[in-house]
Amino acid sequence: MGALAIPPAPLEFWYEFASPYSYIAAMRIDATAQKYGVDIHWRPFLLGLIFRQLGFADSPFNEQPLKRDYMWRDVQRCCECEGLPFVHPKPFPGRSLNAARVAFLGLEKGWGIEFSKAVYNAHFGQGKNLTDADMLKDLIAEISGGDAEHVWSEAMGPDNKAQLRSQTEHAANLGVFGAPTFIRNGELFWGNDRLELALTHSPKQI
Amino acid sequence: MGALAIPPAPLEFWYEFASPYSYIAAMRIDATAQKYGVDIHWRPFLLGLIFRQLGFADSPFNEQPLKRDYMWRDVQRCCECEGLPFVHPKPFPGRSLNAARVAFLGLEKGWGIEFSKAVYNAHFGQGKNLTDADMLKDLIAEISGGDAEHVWSEAMGPDNKAQLRSQTEHAANLGVFGAPTFIRNGELFWGNDRLELALTHSPKQI
């Protein structure tokens, strides 16, 4: 590579903790992106808010029993392909608000990626309740290196809540309607199975 | 390979002519399956009948403007990846009944695969109207080696219509809810992007 080589554009990884395909993407995105030399910007957001704006009463997965059952089988197979543990979490979708608030704060402080992966592993790998404050605090204590109660208070504080909401509004403005969503070079890619395309796709010609 | 090597299980390829992702799958399935030594059984069916049974008023793609616009961009990108021409056909979804009837008959007679690919190329590659009898008859004349009017009459006859309807009912009984669908070793895989998984997935342990 010459001195003038332009580094590949970074990729924004928009993820929702209750989303099974976001779980799979989160667990494989670092190794996959590394192959292509692409930097990943982790962007947790609240897909439930966007679903409400779009007029969905529930997760689209739950609307059609046949599709819902298929989806769980597909998730299980995709986890097997990636060597990931999988437990069907109930109820589904889980309430992701607390986890997303902590992850958002953790990303500012430098431990958000590791925390996000740990939450996914707890929820989809072990079937733990996504909204369980004790579970989340245990992960904070383990990963942040700080005082879990103090971090929790900051995460649940008005500033952090407002910033996560603002990031979710930003996602809606970008046209995000599902998770995971990858945005790169102004192009939106939806779904774990579009990660490779998002990492390799060339920008639109102007 | 030893004399006792068991050939890989065949794959049923369930496709709908109005489905853009079925187009992409149809154009790449032979070369992809050949890599894995898997035989493909082509199964045209009428997804519209199944959508009605499932209570969809329209193609699910059309229900949500944001998803619909994304889907067309995704189809365009996926066609670029495969080196396939793409024209957004209007109206969408096209009326696929006639094409499916001819394809069903053609598969019995040995020219159905080539005809199916030609219909996809005409509709999604060139934007031609899927239900245009003259267009379909031109393809029949070119591909079947028989008299187009005679083939057309047989395709639109009561026996062939009943058999296509019966094949669609069979699809519904198998749990097909979208297109393309691949069925192999009793497992259902939905979507062009699941083709490789369907070709390589091991059967369930009994």
Image (tube, coloured by chain):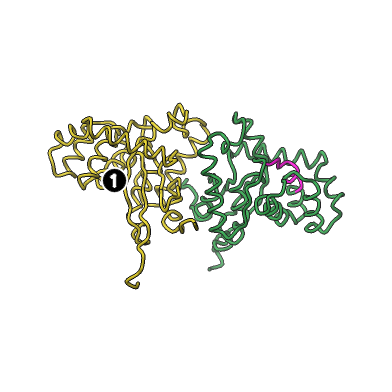
Chain colours: A yellow, B green
* Spot occupied by residue A15 in the image (x, y as percentages of width and height): 36, 42
Would you say the magenta stretch is mainly helix, strand or loop?
helix
Q: How many marks?
A: 1
Closer-to-camera residue (A99/B187): A99
Closer-to-camera residue (B118/A142): B118
Secondary structure category for the residue under label 1: helix
Residue at position x 68%, y 50% in the image:
B127
Is B129 positioned to the left or the right of A16 in the image?
A: right
Above or below, comparing residue A197 to residue B171 in the picture: below
**Residue A105 visible from this viewpoint:** yes
- Residue B112 among those drawn in magenta: no
Q: Magenta span covers which residues?
A: B94-102
Above or below, comparing residue A99 to residue A10 in the picture: above
* Spot occupied by residue A52 in the image (x, y as percentages of width and height): 43, 28
Residue at position x 19%, y 40% in the image:
A140
Residue at position x 50%, y 30% in the image:
A63
Chain ID for label 1?
Answer: A
* Spot occupied by residue A62 in the image (x, y as percentages of width and height): 47, 31
Is B61 positioned to the left or the right of A160 in the image?
A: right
Dividing the picture into quarters, in which one does residue A101 lie? top left
Q: Amino acid at mark 1?
A: Lys
Above or below, comparing residue A126 to residue B151 in the picture: above
- Residue B99 among those drawn in magenta: yes
* Spot occupied by residue A50 in the image (x, y as percentages of width and height): 41, 33
* Label 1 CA crowd tier, 10 Å (few <14, some 14–19, many 20+): some
Is B202 positioned to the left or the right of A7 in the image?
A: right
> From this viewpoint, which residue is outermost toward the top?
A57
Q: Name the residue that disc number 1 marks.
A: A117
> From this viewpoint, which residue is outermost toward the bottom?
A2
